Amino acid sequence: MSILISPSILSADFARLGEEVRAIDAAGADYIHIDVMDGHFVPNITIGPAVVKALRPHTKKTFDVHLMISPVDLFLKDFADAGADIITVHPEAGPHLHRTLQTIKALGKKAGVSLNPATPVSAIAHVMDLVDLVLIMTVNPGFGGQSFIPLMDKVREAKAMIDATGRAIDLEIDGGVNDKTAKDVIAAGANVLVAGSYVFKGGPESYATAIQSLRGE
């Protein structure tokens, strides 16, 4: 399975977001990872549906929208209408994960579930028929630039659960991903890597090199 890179615009220059999205698209990004935080479910506030909608004309790449908000169900349609392609939610962000995933699928979008470091893989055992993406957080969500938490056993467990379904489900890693930690998570079974500060830290002229290095090229 090819390795897909989903740069997180949380680390982009917010004054130039449209240009930044075009730059990472041109640099070879596969997905555009959009971190949505509400200052309640996680300790930070980022962007809402209006910004997603404003960015949509800047690229045809997949919008990989990670909702770190609670209650999440109220906003699913707004992000779907804004141009999200994948909508990822946390099991803790609403009372009925199965219903939330059904809603995302009914909106015509791919459904993802994100597992915080302390959330077990077993939390998604009974919704795998609805899941298109499993996101393993290797930092506690809320801020960019944190150190990687080595959860390789958890990644391998998620990969085994995915393989048992026989379905094409992405296994995504988010948090502290760089050229070194990327090798470990790929070896454990991940095929989508989210990277924020590692991709964006050097400015647009270094985006392509950073993306290639995450793939091991």
Image: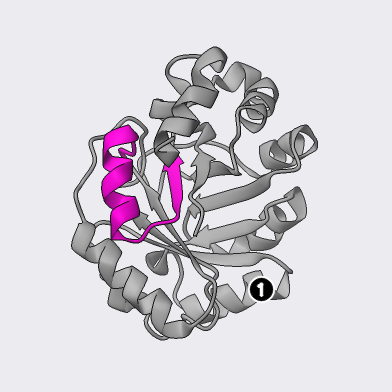
- What residue span does the magenta drawing correspond to? 176-194
Q: Secondary structure at mark 1?
A: helix
Residue 35 image point, x, y percent: 50, 43
Residue 2 percent across, percent down from the top left: 51, 53
Q: Height in image: 32 above or below 25? A: below
Q: For residue 154, which quarter of the picture?
A: bottom left
In this rendered view, identify the residue nearer to me: 68 or 148: 148
Residue at coordinates 44% horizontally, 43% vertically from top-left? 194
Q: Nearer the viewer, residue 31 or 117?
A: 31
User: Where is residue 126 shown, x and y percent of the image?
Assistant: 41, 86
Whether residue 139 appears in this view of the structure is no
> Where is 43 relative to 14, above or below?
below
Residue sitting farthest toward the front:
217
Relative placement, left or right, of 73 versus 44 is right
Q: Within the image, what quadrant is residue 122 found in?
A: bottom left
Packing grade of label 1 (10 A; few <14, some 14-19, many >=20) is: some
Please tell me whether residue 193 belongs to the stretch shown in magenta: yes
Residue at position x 64%, y 18% from top? 16
* Amino acid type, mark 1: Lys
Residue 13 in picture, x, y percent from top left: 55, 19
Name the quadrant of the C terminus: top left
Tell me the residue that label 1 is attached to.
105
Q: Which residue occupies 64% across, 61% down?
A: 76
| Residue at horizontal 23 percent and vertical 36 percent from the top | 147
Number of marks present in the image shown: 1
Q: Does 84 appear above or below 47? A: below
Is 79 on the left-hand or right-hand side of 199? right
Q: Is 10 colored magenta in this rendering?
A: no
Is any part of residue 31 visible from this angle?
yes
Considering every residue shown, the one lying at the far right of the view is 57
